[in-house]
Image: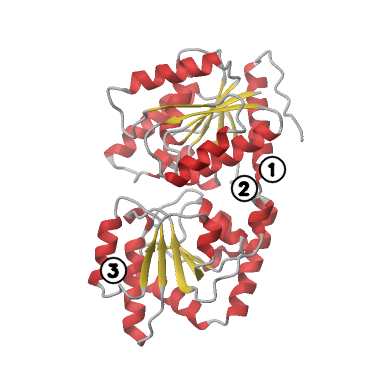
Amino acid sequence: MRIVHVFRAPIGGLFRHVIDLAGEQAKRGHDVGVFCDSTFAGDRNEYLLAKLSESLSLGVRRVEIRRNPNWREPYALKAMANYVRNVEADVLHGHGSKGGVYARLGGLVSATGPIRAYTPHGGSLNYRPGSPLHRLYMGVERLLERGTDAFLFESQYIADRYEQFVCKTNRTSAIVLNGLHPHEMEPVTPEANAADFLYIGEFRFAKGVDNLIEAFAQLKRRDGRAPTLVLVGQGPDEVALRQQVTDEGLAETVSFRKPMAARDAFTLARTMIVPSRAESMPYVVIEAAGASMPLISTDVGGIPEIFGTEAGRLIPPDDVPALISAMDAALQVPTAARREQAFRLAAYIRAHFCVTKMTDRVLEAYSIAAQRRAVPRSFAPVQT
């Protein structure tokens, strides 16, 4: 197959998914390309995109793609159409809200052309139900459903939200869990001087980092101990979060670090905390669980699907007292007991979240969608 992945920004879990999926598809003999935004994505992500491009026979085409609709949109859409036509794509796979719009618009006006697949990655489906923006975006999703050949939902949670707020589609659809590579299943050992707690992700209030800082401050004040916390990432609310740390008098026990490889970050602490108010299927949680990293997490989005039989120990979002209790327990429980719990979760991850299974499911969905559309080209998945 000749496959083009379309998305907006080469950042975050969505980009990680595209890297893994496109790379594995290329390894299996498919011709793969990428169309995405050209604005700055950060040194590490630019490096990862450049590295990925080395394995993509259809190359990487980048133009300016802004988050919100704007007057330059027609230029970007035309550039994508020209690229897709020039590489003779069989499959156009949109990722995220913007990528999903770009990949599927053409399907509204023509029943021919490439198979059009869509992976939401949360996106517009994560907006607060009932809000004006949610109603608008769900209307757009409802329209674009008619131009979609295959839905590849990253979690049962997102599939259920799509059915609840958009429609019950009769198109080809599948739940495709994000996957890890074998080396990511190796346990990570904390540094000798590791902190007590770790947060990895965007510095945004939606991620609940403000709740984590508040809980951390109360934990310190309550028993006189001085646990330590490392915050790894960047984002639009970083200034406010740094000010909160200062206001709480935590400058000596809370440190900020720039984005880095997840497994490097895991060595910085003994327990990772995911205090999110909303999520879809966060890669960093899968990665931490696969690396046998002890975890404290809120019960949001697809996270219960990651925890499987261990989902009962998730805590409610925006519940600072519950977060304090979980953090306090992590400080009290012996290391061996916490690691044993982490090993059980890692075994579940190994069985359900792997890159090869993820790629198998995606290629199978492409083929089924092509057969349903009676595309006259062979779409039998290439085996390794």
Q: Which residue is mark 3?
A: 245
Quarter placement of the C terminus:
top right
Q: Report x, y in % for residue 311.
A: 55, 63
Residue 319 visible in image: no
Q: How is the image coloured?
A: secondary structure
The quadrant where residue 376 appears: top right
Neighbour tally class for label 2: few under 14, some 14-19, many 20 plus, Cα within 10 Å:
many
Q: Is residue 90 above or below residue 165?
A: above
Comes first in the chain, label 3 or label 1: 3
Where residue 195 appears, x then y in whole percent? 46, 73
From the viewer's perspective, tell me whether residue 309 is left or right of residue 243. right
Q: Nearer the viewer, residue 123 or 314?
A: 123
Query: Of residues 44 and 189, which is closer to you in this image?
Result: 44
Mark earlier in primary sequence (2, 1) = 2
Dot 3 surroundings within 10 Å: few (below 14), some, or many (20 or more)? many
On the image, the x and y values in percent for residue 297 come to: 48, 63
Using a 10 Å C-alpha cutoff, classify the residue at mark 1 as few (fewer than 14 neighbours), some (14 to 19) or many (20 or more). Answer: some
Picture quadrant of residue 71: top left
Q: Which residue is mark 2?
A: 179
Residue 56 shows in the view? yes
Question: Which residue is located at x 62 percent, y 47 percent?
Answer: 179
Residue 151 sits above or below residue 175 on the image: above
Q: Earlier in the sequence, mark 2 or mark 3?
A: 2
Q: Amino acid at mark 3?
A: Val
Q: Secondary structure at mark 2?
A: loop
Q: Hey, what amino acid is under mark 2?
A: Gly
**Residue lying at 40% horizontally and 63% vertically, measured from the top left:** 231
User: Tag 3, which secondary structure?
Assistant: helix
